Image (spheres, helix red, strand yellow):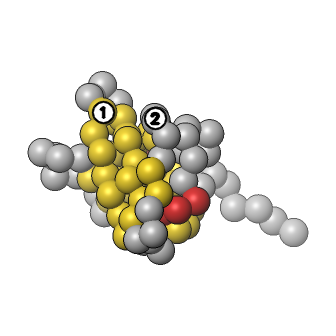
Amino acid sequence: MSVAPLPRPDEILGARGYHRPMAIEFAVQRLQIGDVILTSVPGQAEEVEATVVRDITRTDSTVRVALRAAGGADFTREWPLGELVTVVRGP
């Protein structure tokens, strides 16, 4: 049995976008404080990693999450239930 080598760091973020080897998509209602997701940030064109930093508000139809991007201020995102988010690291 052979195992493929891990990609070099410069191969993870290539010209075609984000390629983190261990990212997983799951329903937004499963998010927890400390999860790091890939998301868009207001005022920026590219997606960035952002950490869930405060309690998550869940309603019958939406999930509202407070996020913090590296070096930035906190911001809030809201998704409908069942929407998929890309989680790159857990808490």
Q: Nearer the viewer, residue 32 or 38?
A: 32
- Above or below, 8 against 14 in this view is above
In whole angstroms, how far apart are the C-alphas of marks 2 and 1?
8 Å
Which of the image's four quarters has the N terminus?
bottom right
Quarter of the rendering containing residue 15: bottom left
Tell me the crowding category of disc 1: few under 14, some 14 to 19, or many 20 or more residues within 10 angstroms, Cα based. Answer: some
The spot of residue 45 in percent (x, y) is: 16, 52
On-image quarter of the C terminus: top right
Answer with mark 2 or mark 1, whichever residue precedes in sequence: 2
Query: Considering only vertical position in the picture, is 19 above or below 56?
Result: below
Q: Mark 1 = which residue? A: 74
Looking at the image, residue 47 sits to the left or right of residue 83; the answer is left
Q: Amino acid at mark 2?
A: Val
Q: Percent position (x, y) of residue 88?
A: 52, 50
Q: Would you call the spot at circle 2 few (<14 residues within 10 Å), some (14-19), or many (20 or more)?
A: some
Left or right: where 17 falls relative to 89: left
* Extreme-left residue of the structure: 43
Judge from the rendering whether residue 54 lies leftward or rightward of residue 23; answer left or right.
left
Q: Are marks 2 and 1 in contact (CB under 8 Å)?
A: yes
At horizontal 27% and vertical 28% (from top left) the residue drawn is 72
Q: Is residue 84 visible?
A: no
Percent x, y for residue 77? 31, 52
Q: Tell me what residue is drawn at x 23 percent, y 52 percent.
A: 46
Q: Which residue was labeled with disc 2? A: 53
The secondary structure type at the circle numbered 1 is strand
The location of residue 26, given as percent across then percent down, is 55, 67
Say which residue appears at 30% left-offset and 33% top-offset: 74
